[in-house]
Image (spheres, rainbow, N blue to C red):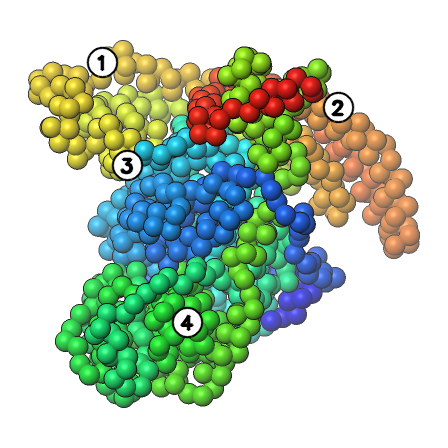
Amino acid sequence: MDNLAHDLPPPYEVHQRDYHHILDHATDITSDGRIDLDIDNELGQRLSRYILTRNESYVGTPSRHRRTGNWNVRLNIVIQVVGSRGDVQPFIALANELQKHGHRVRLATHDLFAGLVTKSGIEFFAVGGDPAELMAYMVKNPGLLPQMETLRGGEIQRKRSMLAAMLRGFWRSCIEPAIGGAPFVADAIIANPPSFAHVHCAQALGVPLHLMFTMPWSTTKAFPHPLANISKAPTTSAGLANYVSYGIVEYLTWQGLGDLINTWRREMLDLEPVPPTEGPGLAETLQVPFTYCWSPALVPKPEDWGTHIDVCGFFFRDAPSYTPPPDLAAFLTAGPPPVYIGFGSIVVDDPDRLISIILKAVQRSGVRAIVSRGWSNFGGDATDDVFFLGDCPHEWLFEHVAAVVHHGGAGTTACGLLNSKPTFIVPFFGDQPFWGKMVAAAGAGPQPIPHKNLNSANLTEGLLFCLTPDAASAAEKISATMAKESGVKRAVDLFHANLPSEDSRCEILPDKPATWLIKRNKKTVRLSTMAVGILLQAGTIDRSHIKLYQTSRITIETRRWDPITAISSTSLATLTNMAASATGIVLKPLEEYHRGQANPSLDLASPLSNSRTPSILARSCSQAHSTTAPTAITSHTTSSDLASSNVSLAPSSQTAASTPSVPALVLASGKSASKILGNLFKGVLLDIPLAATEGMRAVPRLYGTEVVHQDAITDWKSGFAVASRAFGQGMYGAATDIFVETYRGKKEEGAVGVAKGLGKGVVSLAMKTGSAGLGLVAYPSTGVYRSVRARVKDGTRRRIEEMRLEEGRWLIEKKGSEEDVVEMFLSL
């Protein structure tokens, strides 16, 4: 693969600078919504030269372990999952393993899977969203971009409204009790990337985040993004094309969802919007720990993945106890082992056509078959050679078949290979083509055939391939390696290894996480939720003396490359914000008017309302909210429900009340007018000076000199501290670089190096002096602004505090107060 071991991927921001160029000149969209990436263009050649120059000496790094030994702090962990049953099941196994370590685990996913989760002894939280509808949508639009039929049918707006509701649901899963459940505030978050809310919830709470997935989501040169089709000339580096595909997919994803996420961040989390250049690849930029849940025997960890990324093995749950119904048992014993054919949660457009293909192929190949009905509800007349099956655990069933044919879900693929079964994959979307290619590359199955290209002839060929000795031998080899792995236990160890240091423990109850800070005898003391509850109940401390503790602070900053692009892009952003506020003078009153006319109960959803689809989005959010707040009024609420909630149904008064008053409309317009001046002052006095400072500070990086990392600015104290350090470092560098760079150049290149070094020193003198001086104003101003904003936008913080205190009271009621806590605190 083009000497991948010697190629290090470039900094992620390289792609972000050229996204528009990539989209205009390097891509094409196919009829099924996937991306055709043409790497043989000016941008591709430029990136290729950059990568090859930078990474000739790269050697891959081993997996990182921050900590060894047992982890004995018991956490509240929320696992956020979006997807089908096959996506949820592996995380059930993970949750059960985490419970063995004393953690309280909550799984937040679609309402449909409540029974599946709770019967496994795991706390469930409904976040909304219909997985069957999502599966049907993905089958029609298997790539990132939808077909025209989908656009005309209005499905995009419906999916956006569904996502908006799910974002709200995922945040509530972090801080609210489930219906009839106990108080809960997350101490850590585990998520699969398509849940999208994860990094933002972690930032709002200040807790650790760990991503886990069965589909490649991290930039690598080893293989392309599963949603990208690579088109390149034979002379073009395959590694380069693979690497670029991840940046494009990230960018397109953010383009479609960024406005929803930023609106949700502002209105529900009290966080600032993510800068447009930082949204794509945000988790990768932050180096969020990432564990891939597949077997290294099938797909080894690429050598260009960092130490924060690991491959642990597939997640397998304990095999459930299962007794087959008499008709299934009779079919299995009536002849040679059959072939399993099933597509699980996939909802196909034309199930009759697909079942006809299956039956013809079974007849032609002369095999016996078990056909799973699945969500498409395949059916037909059973024969001596074909059995139509309802729900049945794959763990049991795959022990009794000769081979498996399925859609290529990671869980189904893993289960088949673990049982040494040759596998034929018919992919529909997502990571399914990826798994089909990996299985075929291992020799355990034929090349995957997309479902749209499937016919009885190629299905017959695939079935016959699976029954060959070579396929059986390859599957047995993979199975032997997988049997030695313990993916779930390994994933839990990696989760613990990547948690913060000992500073996350309570200093009084060391088996509990620190969630509060208090000053005691000029010392800052870390306390757990339960310890604070006990101390407050005893009157030992006062509520005003404690503040929330963030064990893992996330700061999202706009990265800069030079002062020219920094100042120009920030100036453009300021003008754009001012223009948006100006149009809001007219549009906001209209939106307020239409919202009130449509339904007065939609105020709950208004923070997530998109200006293009306010009514659709609001209805979806309102309905989703009803899953955890039964008293909320939704578009499906009946008159009896309203009557029981003491809500008046008088038509005339209701209609009158739904029309916003003139003062309300004037207020909506006035808010937008005030934002014009606010955006102007913020841009001129804060954003542009900060961008210029950071741009000048970053210039030495352009000619290969390392730039000192700055601490995050979170308040006025850190702002002044950063300004002081940056001034000292900048002035020192400005004074010495002209000598250091000249000497280094002479040593490396002689006279030519002297000239180059002198030039670098002169540039460094100008840039570092300017950055140091301007930073004395820009950094403290940023700190003051963030302190003021935190004071004003404190609704989310106060909500978290309330829920932490409520959980503390509940813990005392459940476990009782511990007198030693008061004595230990007083002794500090």
- Asked if the residues shown at circle 4 and circle 3 are in contact, with their CB atoms under 8 angstroms apart, the answer is no
How many callouts does the rendering have?
4
Towards the viewer: 331 or 749: 331
Query: What amino acid is labelled 2 in the image?
Result: Ser
Q: Secondary structure at mark 2?
A: helix
* Label number found at residue 599: none
* Mark 4 burial class by Cα count in 10 Å: few <14, some 14-19, many 20+: many
Query: What amino acid is labelled 1 in the image?
Result: Ser
Q: Secondary structure at mark 1?
A: loop
Q: Secondary structure at mark 3?
A: loop
Which of the two discs, 3 and 2, sits closer to the camera? Answer: 3
- Asked if the residues shown at circle 2 and circle 4 are in contact, with their CB atoms under 8 angstroms apart, the answer is no
* Label number found at residue 724: 2
Q: Quadrant of residue 465?
A: bottom left
Q: Is residue 154 left or right of residue 249?
A: left
Q: Is residue 344 left or right of residue 572?
A: left
In the rendered structure, which disc, 3 or 2, sits on the residue that comes first in sequence? 3
Q: Position of residue 118 (x, y in %)?
A: 35, 47
Residue positioned 60% across, 30% down in the render: 509
Where is 310 relative to 373, above or below?
Answer: above
Q: Quadrant of the C terminus?
A: top right
Query: What amino acid is labelled 4 in the image?
Result: Gly
Which residue in the protein does label 4 denote?
A: 416
In the rendered structure, which disc, 1 or 4, sits on the residue that comes first in sequence? 4
Q: Position of residue 258 (x, y in %)?
A: 43, 40
Which residue in the protein does label 3 denote?
A: 627
Which residue in the protein does label 1 denote?
A: 661
Residue positioned 27% across, 70% down in the render: 324
Residue positioned 66% across, 39% down in the render: 501
C-alpha span from label 1 to label 4: 63 Å
Where is 658 relative to 742, above or below?
Answer: above
**Residue 87 makes an appearance in the image:** no
